[in-house]
Amino acid sequence: MVGYSTYRSYSEGDVIPPTARQFRGGGGYYDAYNTAFLIRNPLDLQRTHKSKLTPGVELMPFPWLLKPLGDFALDLGGTVGQLGVDAERTPFTINDTLKVAPVICYESAYGEFVAGFVRNGANMIFVITNDGWWGNTAGHRQHMLFSPVRAIETRRSIARSANTGTSCFVNQRGDVFQATEYWKPAVIRQTLNANDKITFYVRYGDYIARASVLGMILFLFLAISRRLQGRKAS
């Protein structure tokens, strides 16, 4: 399983999405993608495009309006500017009983997004990421720590490959194994257990966060109401 920067050109008569870029000098449009490939043999090539894009780097809000600013996006490695995405979270199929969720970089920060792969049949998770642009800071370490959280939420084992570290394996309890050091070449290997059980989190999502937001809104309305009542009484 490897990552690539890929492109799709549009022919005359195709519907041109707002993420598309125009070739220099005109003459057509194309989309750029951050893509993961599963290469098993020449006849079995599976791919998925990154769908949770990094804001300001791969994602430009209101692309129809702000597309000219794409040239000023931060270059954090790979293709920059507004990228195309996949609409579905489709796991890679290894065989009849094993499907793998291909999670690309920043996507590992989103629990409900990763859970979507599991609902679609993934019983194992692979994370591939470019963490080099962080430098040797807390940023790449925090990014790695999202993987144990995803493993606990979904009860899926994780293999994480970062081109500069930290690469590691994570079991279904969130325990981390064979974590590599930052910026040091390494090869690691481990047997992972697959799981096809659906957890409460996968089925219902971030219910704790939603309940917290709802509670905050109710307390806000209650505070405003009491303040207004106090003004009337005075």
Image (tube, rainbow, N blue to C red):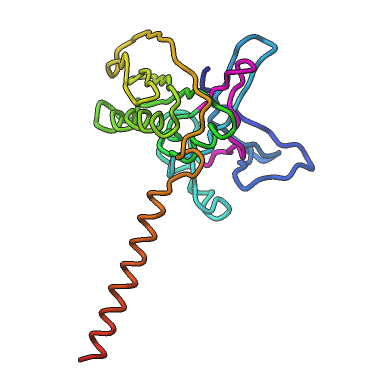
Q: Is residue 82 left or right of residue 56?
A: right
When the figure is inspected, residue 9 is found, relative to residue 229, above or below; the finding is above
Report the residue that reaches farthest toward the right: 13
Residue for point 34% across, 26% down: 174
Q: Is residue 91 left or right of residue 134?
A: right
Which residue corresponds to the image point at 62% horizontal and 42% vertical from the top-left?
20
Reply above or below: 234 against 24: below
The stretch drawn in magenta includes residue 86: yes
Snapshot quadrant of residue 88: top right
Residue range of the region highlighted in magenta in the rendering:
82-102
74 vs 233: above or below: above
Where residue 117 sits in the image (x, y, percent)?
54, 32
Residue 134 vs residue 104: left or right? left
Please give the count of numbered marks on the rendered protein.
0
Which residue extends farthest left? 234
Relative to the observer, which residue lies in front, 76 or 99?
Answer: 99
Q: Report x, y in % for residue 9.
A: 68, 33
Camera-nearest residue between 5 and 224: 224
Task: Between residue 103 and residue 218, name the one nearer to us.
Answer: 218
Q: Residue at image x 34%, y 72%?
A: 221
Q: In the rendered view, would you say 82 is above or below 179? A: below
Q: In which quarter of the view is residue 179 placed?
A: top left
- Residue in the picture at 58% in, 38% down: 85
Could you tell me residue 228's position as x and y percent?
A: 28, 83
Main secondary structure of the magenta stretch: loop
Could you tell me which quadrant the C terminus lies in?
bottom left
Query: Is residue 99 part of the magenta span, yes or no?
Result: yes
